[in-house]
Amino acid sequence: MEFYTVVLKQSAGYWVALCLENGIVGQGTIQEDAIRKLKEAIESFEIVYESESNIYKSPISIDELHEFLFVEEKEQDSEIYELRKVYA
């Protein structure tokens, strides 16, 4: 089981969880759902990553993080963000 850093963002009535180590996301109506779906996506990705030679993973860039955090800023009055650690 590995440790991952996750940024949670509330957007349009949903929570989106972004893994900083690999750019994988999960979405749900509550934070726990978003994290659960992210964990499932990470686990699925790891299976494929270990079995395929043409798959790579890398941390997201600062530009990608900025886009994730602020892409809808003009449309909404306030955003809620949270940083968490998860094990998947």
Image (cartoon, rainbow, N blue to C red):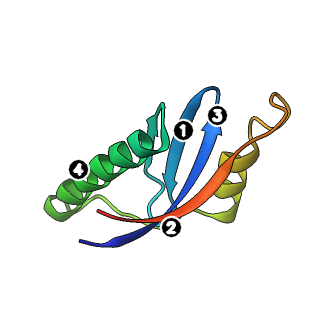
Direction from residue 67 to residue 47 in the image, left or right: left
Going from N to C along the chain, the mark reached first, 1 or 4, is 1
What secondary structure is found at the residue carrying circle 3? strand
Direction from residue 67 to residue 73 in the image, left or right: right
What secondary structure is found at the residue carrying circle 2? loop
Q: Amino acid at mark 4?
A: Ser
Residue drawn where x is 27% and y is 59% of the image: 54
User: Pointer 3 and pointer 1: residues touching (CB < 8 Å)?
Assistant: yes
Q: Amino acid at mark 3?
A: Ser
Position in image of residue 23 (x %, y %): 48, 55
Question: Looking at the image, which is closer to me, 43 or 59?
Answer: 43
Between the residue at mark 2 and the residue at mark 3, the CA separation in whole angstroms equals 22 Å
Between the residue at mark 4 and the residue at mark 2, the CA separation in whole angstroms equals 17 Å
Q: Quadrant of the C terminus?
A: bottom left
Between the residue at mark 2 and the residue at mark 1, the CA separation in whole angstroms equals 21 Å
Going from N to C along the chain, the mark reached first, 2 or 1, is 1
| Mark 3, other Cα within 10 Å: few <14 / some 14–19 / many ≥20 | some
Residue drawn where x is 31% and y is 47% of the image: 41
Q: Which mark is residue 59?
A: 2
Q: Which residue is mark 3?
A: 11
Residue drawn where x is 74% and y is 42% of the image: 79
| Mark 2, other Cα within 10 Å: few <14 / some 14–19 / many ≥20 | few
Between the residue at mark 3 and the residue at mark 4, the CA separation in whole angstroms equals 25 Å
User: Pointer 4 and pointer 2: residues touching (CB < 8 Å)?
Assistant: no
Q: Which mark is residue 15?
A: 1
Q: Which mark is residue 44?
A: 4
Q: Amino acid at mark 2?
A: Pro
Q: Amino acid at mark 1?
A: Trp
Q: Nearer the viewer, mark 2 or mark 3?
A: 3
Q: Nearer the viewer, mark 1 or mark 4?
A: 1
